[in-house]
Amino acid sequence: MVLGVSGWLGEKLGWPTKNIRIAFLLAVLLAGFGVGLYLILWVVKMISK
């Protein structure tokens, strides 16, 4: 992904970035809400700086 959300979220949760990227990909493909969730998390990331 482009905005650095996966790396930031992985750091916060202590999870590997690869697993978070896979989860976002599955959310996009299976449920369709992964893009919106990604953008919301990007906003939270920008606000929390």
Image: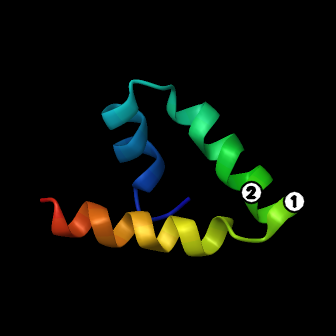
Is 45 situated left or right of 49 in this image? right
The quadrant of the picture occupied by the N terminus is bottom right
Residue 37: percent from the left, percent from the top? 55, 67
Residue 32: percent from the left, percent from the top? 78, 71
Q: Name which residue type carries label 1.
A: Leu
Task: Give the crowd class for mark 1: few <14, some 14-19, many >=20 residues within 10 Å.
Answer: few
Q: Name which residue type carries label 2.
A: Ala
Under tag 1, what secondary structure?
A: helix
Is 9 situated left or right of 19 in this image? left
Residue 21, by quadrant, is: top right
Residue bearing the label numbered 1: 30
Pick whichever, 7 or 12, lies toward us. 12
Give yes or no for contact between labels 2 and 1 (Cβ–Cβ under 8 Å).
yes
Residue 2 to residue 21: above or below: below
Residue 43 to residue 6: above or below: below
Q: Please give the name of the residue rendered at 47% of the width and 47% of the height, measured from the top-left corner.
A: 6
Q: Please give the name of the residue rendered at 38% of the width and 67% of the height, measured from the top-left corner.
A: 42
Residue 16 to residue 10: above or below: above
Q: CA distance from mark 2 to mark 1?
A: 5 Å
Q: Please give the name of the residue rendered at 49% of the width and 64% of the height, measured from the top-left corner.
A: 2
Residue sitting at the far left: 49
Residue 46: percent from the left, percent from the top? 23, 68
Residue 36, by quadrant, is: bottom right
The coloring applied to the image is rainbow
Residue 4: percent from the left, percent from the top? 40, 55
Is 22 situated left or right of 14 in this image? right
Task: Give the crowd class for mark 2: few <14, some 14-19, many >=20 residues within 10 Å.
Answer: some
- Label annotation for residue 27: 2
